[in-house]
Image: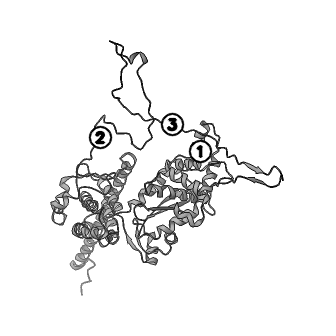
Amino acid sequence: MKNAPSSSPTVTQLERKLAAADAENARLLALMEKKEAQWEATKQSLFEQFRLALERQFGPSTEKYRVDQRDLLINEAEVAVDEEDAAGSDATADDATIDTATPAKRRTRGGRVALPPELPRVEVIHELPNDARHCRDDGTALKVIGEEVSEELHVVPARIEVIRHVRRKYACPLCEEGVNTAPAPAKLLPKSNASATLLAYIATAKYQDALPLYRQSQIFARHGAEIPRNTLARWMVQAGERIIPLIDALRQHLLNAPLIHMDETTLQVNQEADRAASATSYMWVQRGGPPGQQVVLFDYAASRAGRVPVDLLGDYAGRLITDGYEGYAEVVRRNGLTHAGCWAHARRKFVEAQKVQPKNKTGKADWALNQIRKLYGVEKQAKALEPEARHALREQKSRPLIAQLRTWLDKSLAQVLPKSALGKALHYLDNQWPRLTRFLDDGLIPLDNNPAENAIRPFVIGRKNWLFSHTPSGAHASAAIYSLIETAKANGLSPYDYLQYVFATLPTLDDDDLNTL
């Protein structure tokens, strides 16, 4: 009788089950390790975000970063350039935002800054009493042999006064027909009682000094003039509308520039059709033109979409300098623009990465910042050069720095977690690389978009005080007045004096005469 087949597993089956179990265990272990790595990366990212939040809240607002001589000596492609190049590249493009290896000169403690010679002087003569102007011995009258002069600043407080325009009427005493009246002076706002001086004062206080209109109304009341806030607001909206022809003339001048900087920032408008009061709108800025003929234009838009720069730039076909926002891609493609990026933005991300490093430690962020600092050092040397000479200097000094940075970047991308602060800085640098290196091929292209950022900064500061615009018309008016103020500053003019001149002169001009402003 044959034996019945055994129901127990064979050795081969057991081995297969053990192998499957081992494979499953290995898979679960790998999954656990992956999850653990993801958790560590997330934890590290959250920790870095927390440290950056503390820095933003309590740390200095500048973009200063540590410069350590040890940063200059990391290996292979990370070795700094020749000592000769390094000696000339210690300076940066913006001394206000970056530390250099050489400490800045400081004024001696207790020293006094000389009063500006252009300020008007009022002399007050101090004489000896009459009885002290004679010799004590023989009574001879003393003679003036010199004088001691000291100066002090004196402020004349604001004074509100009323200008009465008296228009004489003339008539013939014989025929008693026909009365001739002296013409009324041209006014920016004909139906208001605001002079060009008052309008310029209000606009400068709000848009340059960030003083909200309700505070100005309180100040005027203390000086004896009750001007409601809504009246001040109406004057500013009307003034903004009246200067639109001048803004259009400035826009034509801007679009003829070989290079334009652009940037944008957020704005809240409370009453806008089909939009919630909390919806985010934007103020766009453009800047361009040769030295002494700079134009800065602000434009309000409810959107940050790519169609906005398309509308603003029209058929412009020159060079465009922006940050890394991809909304400019459409106008670049349509108009065939030469699009360059901003090294200040790339540097800013490495500054953030440096801030979350352990204290007294150096790393990749330090090396990248040092390399960018050297690029700015070359730019300082090239600042006064013509475009062709600037391009030649960049070929000699900047291109080797860029080559080193690219080699280091390729190696570092695979060594750093993408979601970490350093990883974000590296990936931003990698993604923006074609735009960031475009300056090497064109001597006209600057290293960064700081001119646009500097122009938009007063708006950002003012926004912290007045918070929002009430209506789109108010936002457009603000954009127009900001344009005149920042254009004046860009050309070395006093914003108040320029606004006063424009507000007084514009009503007397034809459209063909606008370029004289």
Callout 2 crowding tier (Cα within 10 Å): few <14, some 14–19, many ≥20 = few
The mark that comes first in sequence, 1 or 2, is: 2
- Residue 372: x %, y % from top left: 27, 61
Q: Look at 62% across and 52% down and name the residue there.
A: 235
Q: In the shown orientation, is residue 479 left or right of residue 143? A: right
Residue 156: give its label.
Answer: 3
Q: SS for tag 2?
A: loop
Q: Amino acid at mark 3?
A: Val
For the residues marked 1 and 2, what is the alpha-carbon distance in whole angstroms? Answer: 39 Å
- Along the line of sight, the residue nearer the viewer: 450 or 112: 112
Q: Is the C-beta separation of discs 3 and 1 under 8 Å?
A: no
- Along the line of sight, the residue nearer the viewer: 354 or 284: 284
Residue 445: give its label.
Answer: none
Q: Amino acid at mark 1?
A: Tyr
For the residues marked 2 and 3, what is the alpha-carbon distance in whole angstroms? Answer: 29 Å
Label 2, on which residue? 107
- Residue 16: x %, y % from top left: 25, 77
Label 1, on which residue? 214
Q: Is residue 81 visible?
A: yes
The mark that comes first in sequence, 2 or 3, is: 2
Q: Is residue 302 visible?
A: no
Mark nearer the viewer, 3 or 1: 3
- Residue 388: x %, y % from top left: 29, 71
